[in-house]
Amino acid sequence: MFEYEEQTEIIGARCTLHEAYKGYTEGTIVGDFGLRVVVQLDNGKEIVEYRDEVTIYD
């Protein structure tokens, strides 16, 4: 599905999903694959979202 993970400054940043996933919207970026990011939600679940579907906080 993805080829390479990029080590960028957004890994570890808090974020908010634009659309809730099973009631959760807050999480942390744990992977960056260019157009998509891996978000670990506050409940521990990791999901893949397009970068423009999340608001990333510095």
Image (cartoon, rainbow, N blue to C red):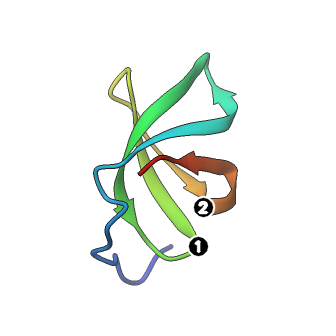
User: In the image, what residue type sits under mark 2?
Assistant: Arg
Question: Please, is residue 39 above or below residue 33 in the view?
Answer: above
Q: Which residue is at 60% across, 47% downward?
A: 55
Q: Secondary structure at mark 1?
A: loop
Looking at the image, tell me whether mark 1 or mark 2 is earlier in sequence order.
1
Taking the view exactly as shown, the residue that stands out farthest to the bottom is 3
Mark identifier at residue 51: 2
Q: Which residue is at 28% across, 50% downward?
A: 12
Front one among 58 and 39: 58
Q: Secondary structure at mark 2?
A: helix
Q: CA distance from mark 1 to mark 2?
A: 6 Å
Mark identifier at residue 35: 1
The total number of labels drawn is 2
Q: Which residue is at 32% across, 27% downward?
A: 44
Question: For the residue carrying disc 1, how many other residues have a C-alpha within 10 Å: few (<14), some (14-19), or many (20+)?
Answer: few
Residue 55 horizontal side relative to residue 39, left or right:
right
Residue 41, percent from left and from top: 42, 31
- Contact (Cβ within 8 Å) of mark 1 with mark 2: yes
Residue 21, percent from left and from top: 61, 28
Question: Please, is residue 25 above or below residue 18 in the view?
Answer: above
Residue 10, percent from left and from top: 37, 61
User: In the image, what residue type sits under mark 1?
Assistant: Leu
